[in-house]
Amino acid sequence: MISKTIEIDGKQVELKASAAIPRLYRIKFRRDILQDVSKLKDSYVKNQTEGKQFENIDLEMFENVAYIMAKHANPDIPGTIEEWLEEFNVFSIYQVMPVILELWCLNEETQIESKKKLKKVAGR
């Protein structure tokens, strides 16, 4: 489990990534977070390198991923994404997306290392 606290619109928001995130995301949004984060990463890179605009679906996926990571870190945040987003005047994809991608990549690395250690202990 990996977490990081960032400031969004003057509020401290903790985002958390763990092995539970794909399940929580699937239950809440009925989507595959692995596919969504991959698409978001591609869109973000194209935006940063080629100046391409984010599509509406990208923005929705971004909000969903940010919400599920925040809800995972703090179960007391509102029960719907709309209520949560209402807490902010400004919610910048350019500020939050790098943190989401960083947490996601660090979490994946941690899971891969855990699998390697398990195989080593099991003698494989």
Image (cartoon, rainbow, N blue to C red):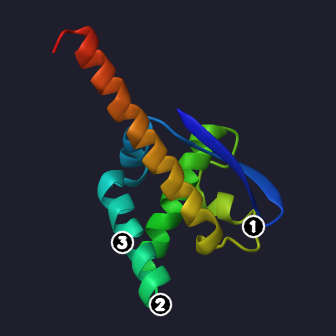
Give amino acid for label 2: Gly
Is the residue marked by circle 2 packed among few (<14), some (14-19), or many (20+) residues within 10 Å? few
What residue is at 79 percent from the left and 67 percent from the top?
9
In the picture of the structure, the residue carrying the numbered disc 1 is 88
Of the pair 121 and 11, the residue shown nearer to us = 121
Label 3 element class: helix
Any part of residue 106 in sight: yes
Residue 10: image tag:
none
In the picture of the structure, the residue carrying the numbered disc 3 is 42
Of callouts 3 and 2, the N-terminal one: 3
Give amino acid for label 1: Phe
Label 2 element class: loop
Label 1 element class: loop
**Eye-nearest disc, 1 or 2:** 2
Q: CA distance from mark 1 to mark 2?
A: 26 Å
Instruction: Please state the horizontal and vertical placement of residue 21, each as a whole percent of the image.
Output: 44, 41
Residue 38 lies, with reference to residue 55, above or below; the image says above
Horizontally, residue 97 falls left or right of residue 112, namely: right
Instruction: Please state the horizontal and vertical placement of residue 11, each as a whole percent of the image.
Output: 81, 57
Residue 113 lies, with reference to residue 12, above or below; the image says above
Work out which quarter of the rendered image holds the C terminus and state it. Answer: top left
Residue 51: image tag:
2
Label 1 close to label 2 by CB (< 8 Å) = no
Horizontally, residue 41 falls left or right of residue 8, namely: left
